[in-house]
Image (cartoon, coloured by chain):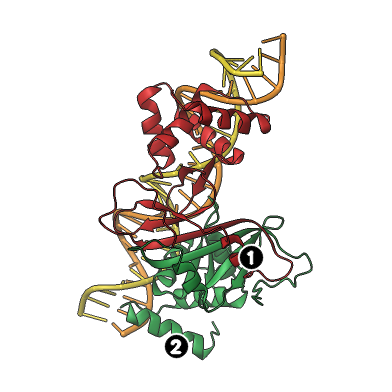
Chain colours: A green, B red, C orange, D yellow
Amino acid sequence: MELTTEAKEQLDTALSVSGLRSTRQREHIYKVLLTRRDHPSADEVYARAKQEMPSISLATVYNCLDTLVECGLVKRLNYERESSRYCPNDGDHAHFMDEATGRVYDIALPEDFEKVVAKVLPDGFKANKVKLSFTGYAPVDLESNRVALSAK
Amino acid sequence: MELTTEAKEQLDTALSVSGLRSTRQREHIYKVLLTRRDHPSADEVYARAKQEMPSISLATVYNCLDTLVECGLVKRLNYERESSRYCPNDGDHAHFMDEATGRVYDIALPEDFEKVVAKVLPDGFKANKVKLSFTGYAPVDLESNRVALSAK
DNA sequence: CTAGGTGCAAAAGGTTTGCGGTTAA
DNA sequence: TTAACCGCAAACCTTTTGCACCTAG
C-alpha cells in the first residue's frame, strides 16, 4: 500500500495517459513488483499480492500485469516456453537467466547500444522493440538481489 | 522425403552424436523446415508434414522438433506468449517480427557481434546462449521469402 | 532382440474470458 | 451515475504425458 509518491505519480499518469483508471489492485501489483526487484511469474506475483490483499484474484493479477505492460511501466519477459515473468521497466536493459538457479538478472546496456544494434538491421527495417537476452551461468557469490549492473 | 544428401548427413551425424536414432519422422520434419525458409509453429509444421506423411501425429511433431532443437539443427523462437516457432539453425542470426504481418525474418549478425555483446556482461557472467530479437516494421516490398541478410 | 520412437487420447498448465456485482471518476 | 474494473469459475489452447504398439540398429 505504501508506494513512494513518486512511483504513485508515475503510475497514475501512465494509466491516465492511456485512459485507464487507477485502482487499488493495480497500485498493489505495481508495488509488489517494485518491492523485491526480481522477476516473478504471474503466479508468484499472485502469491505475494495476496499477503496484503487476500481477496485479489489470479485473473485480476493477470489483468493488472497486462495493463502495466501496456502502459510501459512493466516489462514482460519470456524464456522459451516457461511462464512469463515480470519486472518494473527502468529503462532499457537486457536479461540474463542463470541456468543453475533459474534466477534472472538485469543487465545494464551502454547508451550506444541501440545504435550498435541498429547497424545490424538491413535497410527498410524499423525496430520498435529490441530484446537481448542471455542464458548461462551467473557468479555464485552474487548478493541475493537481482539487479546486476556494471556494464563494462 | 528428398533431403539433400548433405542435409541428411548433417541430420544423421547430429542425431548419432547425441545417441539418437534417425527415423522417417525426424527426417521428414527436418525436410519440412528446410523446404520453406519461414518460421512455422508446431501446428503449421504438423499441417505441412501431414501432406506427405498423413499418419504422423502432432505429438510426434512436437517430439521431433524438440529433438532437432536439442541436436542444434533447429532453433525454437518465442515471441511473447505466442506459440513457439521453428527454423533451421544456419549459424547465429537474430529475428525480426513484422508487427503488420506476423512474419519473422532472419537477420544476419556480423562476426564480431558476440564480442560486442560480451562487453555488456558484468564480470563473472558466462553466457551460453545469446538471443537478439526485434519487433517492428519490415519493408513492404520484400520478396515473400524470409531470409533477409545484408547486415550493413 | 530391445531400447528408443511413434501414435493416440487424455491431462496438464498457463492464460483468457464471460458474467454478475463493485467502484473510481 | 456509469463505464471501467474486479472476483469467480469455466473455457481455451498449446504443449506434455502415459501407454501399447512398432522399428532402427
Q: In the figure, B27 relative to A91: above or below?
A: above
The amino acid beneath tag 1 is Ala
* Vertical comparison of A60 with A2: above or below: above
Does the image show residue A115? yes
Toward the bottom, the furthest residue is: A5
What x and y, as percent, mark residue A144? 73, 71
Helix, strand, or loop for circle 2? Answer: helix
Where the N terminus of chain A falls, by quadrant?
A: bottom right
User: Dot 1 surroundings within 10 Å: few (below 14), some, or many (20 or more)?
Assistant: some
Return the residue nearer the eye: A105 or A133: A133
Residue shown at the point (55%, 36%) measured from the top left: B68
The correct choice, above or below, for A119 with respect to B86 in the image is below
Check if mark 1's residue and mark 2's residue have beta carbons within 8 Å: no
Q: Chain of mark 2?
A: A
Disc number for residue A58: none
Q: Which mark is residue A9?
A: 2
Residue in the picture at 42% in, 21% down: B55
What residue does disc 1 label? Answer: B118
How far apart marks 1 and 2 lie (CA) works out to 37 Å
> Residue A34 sits in which quadrant?
bottom right
Chain hosting mark 1: B
Q: Residue at image x 77%, y 64%?
A: A140
- Give coordinates of residue C12: x percent, y percent: 55, 42
Q: Amino acid at mark 2?
A: Glu
How many marks on residues?
A: 2
Q: Nearer the viewer, residue A123 or C25?
A: A123
Q: Is residue A39 in view from this perspective?
A: no
Question: Quadrant of the image for the C terminus of chain A?
Answer: bottom right
Q: Nearer the viewer, mark 1 or mark 2?
A: 1
The image position of residue D3, as x and y in percent, is 24, 73
